[in-house]
Structures are given as structure tokens and as C-alpha cells.
Image (spheres, helix red, strand yellow):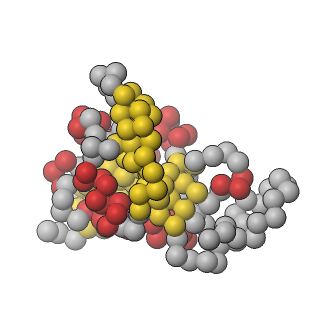
Amino acid sequence: MSEISIRAMTAADWPDASRIYREGIETGLATFQSECPPWEDWDRAHLGACRLVAVLDGSIAGWAALSAVSGRCVYAGVAEVSVYIAKSVRHTGVGTRLLNALVSASEESGFWTLQSGILQENKASLRLHEKCGFRVVGYREKIGRDQNGNWRNTVLMERRSKRDDFSDTCGCACGHDEEKEPT
């Protein structure tokens, strides 16, 4: 296999990234979404930091990004992971490289916890997350309906950073007194 490079995602990458997203939607295992959003909607729904693409042989082979889990400032260091790999390169190591790069980028950007809600039947994604240091913390029963209207369960996975040097990334005047996220 050729060398996989990881770089920041730009708006110009959206045509390729959205094609990969649609491939994920078509599996019925990757998301509850039934349609790929336009760039503007996707851009608003994802944090500006930690948007990555994997490039293989000059083509985008996957993407990963973070979304906020809460608008409350005390959760500023917690984010939800999205990771999608092109159908043609699944099970080749692209996902592992990309998710590990996202973990590193997230820690550099001040995130101490990453979480993923993965459809229970998506064994490949569950294995990928576990391989990259995530652990199962729970299950959500009948949390959403799929494209056919069926209730589906998700597995909640989380990865806590091993770093202990995170400062309060909030910077707000909400009155909380946490210097660091408790372990």
C-alpha cells in the first residue's frame, strides 16, 4: 500500500468527503442520517479544530472531525467523533491512521475526552475505536430510528486522554472552579 498522509480538511475537500459520507450512509451502519448535508450545514455542525482527511495516492480516502457534545463551557474539552473511510480502502489501516491522528490533534487542541455513538451492528467501527484506545462505557437502547423507521441501539465509546496537563479551556465567567478535569 502507498503512503497515507493526513492533513487538515478544507471546504475544497467536501466533494470527496461527502462521497465517502454517502458511502457510509448507504451501509445503514454508519449514521442515522439519510442524506449527506451541503458543506455549509456540515461546517456549522462540526468544530473548526481537528478536521482531518487521509490522502492515499493523491485521493481522499477518509475524513474525521469533531462535534461539540454540549454548549456548556465545562464540557469544552469533550467532543464527539465522526470518522468515515472510503469503501475502496476499508480494512487497510487508513481508519487507524486517521483516528489516531484525530486523537493526537484533539489533545493538542485541548480535548481531554472523545466519545463516539456507534450503531451496535457496526462491528468494524467498534473494533477501530477499541484499537485506538476507546472503551465501551454504555449502550443507548432505541436511541434513534434508521432510514427504514426501525429503532436502533448505539454503543457509547469514550477515550480519555492520558495527559494530565489540560487547563480549564472554558475561559468563561460561569463560576466553576475546576482547574483540570477530574480523573
Q: Position of residue 59 (x, y in %)?
A: 24, 55
Q: Nearer the viewer, residue 131 or 95?
A: 131
Residue that extends furthest to the top in the rendered view of this protein = 149
Q: Nearer the viewer, residue 112 or 57?
A: 112
Residue 175 in sight from this viewpoint: yes
Q: Position of residue 12 (x, y in %)?
A: 40, 47
Q: Is residue 3 above or below residue 127?
A: below
Q: Nearer the viewer, residue 47 or 77?
A: 77
Q: Position of residue 31 (x, y in %)?
A: 36, 38
Q: Quadrant of the N terminus?
A: bottom left
Instruction: Indicate left or right for 85 with 157 as reference.
Output: left
Q: Position of residue 34 (x, y in %)?
A: 34, 28
Give the residue drawn at x 18%, y 55%.
89
Give the residue drawn at x 58%, y 47%.
69
Residue 52 in sight from this viewpoint: no
Q: Is residue 63 above or below residue 40?
A: below
Q: How many marks?
A: 0
Q: Is residue 28 above or below residue 178?
A: above
Give the residue drawn at x 33%, y 25%.
150
Q: Nearer the viewer, residue 148 or 98?
A: 148
Give the residue drawn at x 72%, y 66%.
168
Q: Quadrant of the C terminus?
A: bottom right
Instruction: Indicate left or right for 30 with 70 as reference.
Output: left
Instruction: Indicate left or right for 59 with 17 as reference.
Output: left
Instruction: Indicate left or right for 94 with 141 as reference.
Output: left
